[in-house]
Amino acid sequence: MLKHVSAPARFFSQVPNEIIRHPHLSSDAVRLLTWQLSLPDGVDQPLSKTAEQAGIKKTAFTRAKRELAAAGYFHEWRGQGAGGLWRTRQLVSNVPLTAEEAVAVRDGGAPPSAVPPAIGEPGRPAVGRSPKENTGENTSHPLAERGARAIVAVCHAERRLRLAGREVERLAPLAGEWLSRGATLQELREALTDGLPERVHSPVGILRDRLTRKMPDPAPEPAPRPQPLRACTGTCGRMIRPVADETTCRDCRLEAAGSDSSEAEGATQRGMNAVRAALEACVRPRPAI
């Protein structure tokens, strides 16, 4: 293969080889990212507008946007401004950023130093594509999406845990379960990286083992809401808060139980008196004739 390259004198952009050769970014994702990186400073163009100009249709744009987010090249935040209006802020970068690094850049911090691009074939990537719809796994669920982002963030910071895209997909539900149980990203990172061997032969294997073995306990179930107040149906007329399905207060229940007990005792006593009278009639001597 012969190549002739003439360096442009102006209107050019520097794009890392890692982006151009990324094995888990589609051509639409690469086009979106390089288009955004080529825009002059000060141009605030949302990613959707870039997709429109680049001729990328809605479905392909959604997929490409998800790929860039999972790979760490795109971050997005939505919140209310000072006037109460909702706004969306977006960030693209020419190097993968963790969630914490992206927030630092958004808030005016210095971006991490870019590693000079290597010449030749790229090494094994630290990030993967977002879950596909035809993988058979329900990784499009928001919880699994959060899990995938967490795995990508951990693996980006620890070179011994570099994963391929499909490996991120398989681990995403486990990481999502950690987050659903209240674990923070820092707790997840510590659980996955503390005490790693000097050489990790199977990153996906050791991550799956730690995600499963160190899974935190489920969050406790919330206490049931108390029953609403209701009027006692007994004779007192006071308000009660039922524990189950009772309709009377304790005092009225005791009073009713005492009344029932007295009636039962009276009936027993009358029965015993009748039996005694019958026995006496049987043994009473008959008058002589």
Image (cartoon, helix red, strand yellow):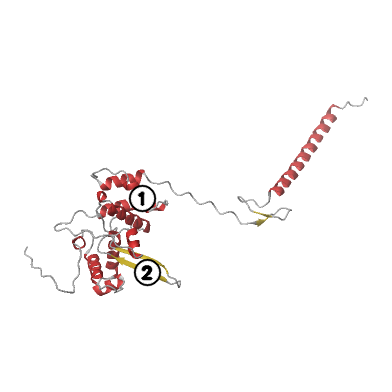
- In the depicted structure, whether residue 139 falls above or below residue 286: below
State the SS at label 2: strand
Residue position for label 2: 88
| Residue 186 visible from this viewpoint | yes
| Residue 143 picture location, percent across and down | 37, 56
Identified at 82% across, 30% down, the residue is: 279
Q: How many residues crowd around disc 2 within 10 Å: few (fewer than 14), some, or many (20 or more)?
A: few
Disc 2 and disc 1 in contact, CB within 8 angstroms: no
Q: Is residue 286 left or right of residue 180?
A: right
* Amino acid type, mark 2: Thr
| Residue 133 visible from this viewpoint | no
| Residue 280 picture location, percent across and down | 84, 29
State the SS at label 1: helix
Q: Farthest residue toward the right?
A: 289
- What number is the disc on residue 188? 1
The quadrant the C terminus occupies is top right
| Residue 59 picture location, percent across and down | 29, 67
Figure quadrant of residue 42: bottom left
The quadrant the N terminus occupies is bottom left
Give the alpha-carbon distance from disc 2 to disc 1, as whole Å. 27 Å
* Amino acid type, mark 1: Leu
Q: Is residue 143 left or right of residue 13?
A: right
- What number is the disc on residue 66? none
Identified at 37% across, 69% down, the residue is: 88
| Residue 112 picture location, percent across and down | 28, 60
